[in-house]
Amino acid sequence: MTLAWTSAGFRAGAVAALLAASGSQFRGGTAAAPQTVLTLVVIADCVAFSAVCLRRGRIPPVWAGADLICLIAAVGLSSWPGLQHGRPGQSHFYNFTVIVAPSLGLPAWRPLVSLAGGAALGLTDFLPSLRAGSTYPRWNALPDAMTVIGVAALAAVLARLLRESAAALDRHGQVAVEQAASLARHRERLRQQVDLSAHLMTTLEVLAAQDAIDDPVISDRLRVESLKLRELITADHSSGGGGLLPRLLEVAAQKAAIGLRVEVAPDDAEASLVNDLSVPVTDAVVAAAGEALTNVRKHSGVDRAEVSLAVVADGVAVTIADRGRGYDPAATAEGFGQQRSLRRRVGAVGGRVAIESAPGSGTRVVLWVPLAGGQDAEP
């Protein structure tokens, strides 16, 4: 469509130049009528050709060929002896041919065809200089003819580049559309898979939590599979993603899959500070809390635990408590088992661990990590 409008624009300018030349070069005389007829024919041709191009949104090669023949014939006849007023000389169509020449390179034909068309039109302009007694000197006529040829050739090159760019843009656009459609289908499949997995995971967790399966081997297998399924669904929230509270909620959900009900109770007034820990600190707290809950499941003799969060002494304290059988810390060697593992994890990020327990009174584990600027505070 761009080339069609460009061609129509050149034709409009060429017609304006032709009307101006016609009014100044012949006024009356025996040649006035033929020249007027030729001028009207060329104007009608330009109007018809432009209308066809704009209506179709392109430049039809067949119409462009017929138009070229019409122009060459009209320009040639305009300087034919007997039709030209006075002595042989330059055709009054010359300015028209220079302006209309770029439109010869715009149709979707081979560049050699555009070059040949420009050469034919330029030669037609050059012929009056070869006649005896011509007022159009050859030294002037030759550059004039070469101008028409050069303009047509340049237009052909530019039009070809424009078409190739438009074709490449169309191809890229089509590829983008196809990729977008493929991505949409992929996302829909993922959404359906997540929905199905979540539904299946819920079913497995319910069966495992309610001990609906009498066979302990199958029941344990259900718990393991539901845990794996939940890990897959929440994989995007693995290390480095999400705040402390969301990730502790995930840990609680994972423990529920193996039969431990965990209640997470955050301090709502300090929620923004609780979730404002760095990624390494958050990772350490989540890992330590998960290990403490695993110990509750293994050793406490109960299936329920509580996790609470609070801002304490320029830091965040995460407390894991159960009401199980407990144990006597004095009877356990310092740095052994749970204490050593938890202190190593939390201590690596500048935090501390406090463990309180007594036989028959449950166990309370406090994980404290500093906020920014609170490295030296005590839990």
Image (cartoon, helix red, strand yellow):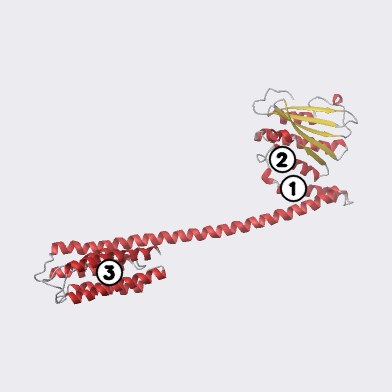
CB atoms at circles 2 and 1 under 8 Å apart?
no
Amino acid under disc 1: Arg
**Which type of secondary structure does the marked residue at label 2 adopt?**
helix
Work out whether mark 2 precedes mark 1 in sequence or the reverse, and give the earlier one: 1
- Farthest residue toward the front? 28
**Which type of secondary structure does the marked residue at label 3 adopt?**
helix
- Farthest residue toward the left? 133
| Mark-to-mark CA distance, 2 and 1 | 13 Å
Which of pointers 2 and 1 indicates the residue nearer the eye? 2
Q: Look at the image and tell me in which quarter the N terminus lies.
A: bottom left
**Vertical side of 200 occupied by 138: above or below:** below
Residue 372 position within the rendered picture, expressed as x and y whole percent measured from the top left? 65, 28
Work out whether mark 1 precedes mark 3 in sequence or the reverse, and give the earlier one: 3
Say few, some or many: other residues with alpha carbon within 10 Å of mark 1 (under 14 / 14 to 19 / 20 or more). many
- Residue bearing the label numbered 1: 230
| Mark-to-mark CA distance, 3 and 2 | 75 Å
Task: Please name the residue shown 72% across and 25% down the image.
Answer: 313
| Relative to 289, 277 lies left or right | left
- Residue bearing the label numbered 3: 117
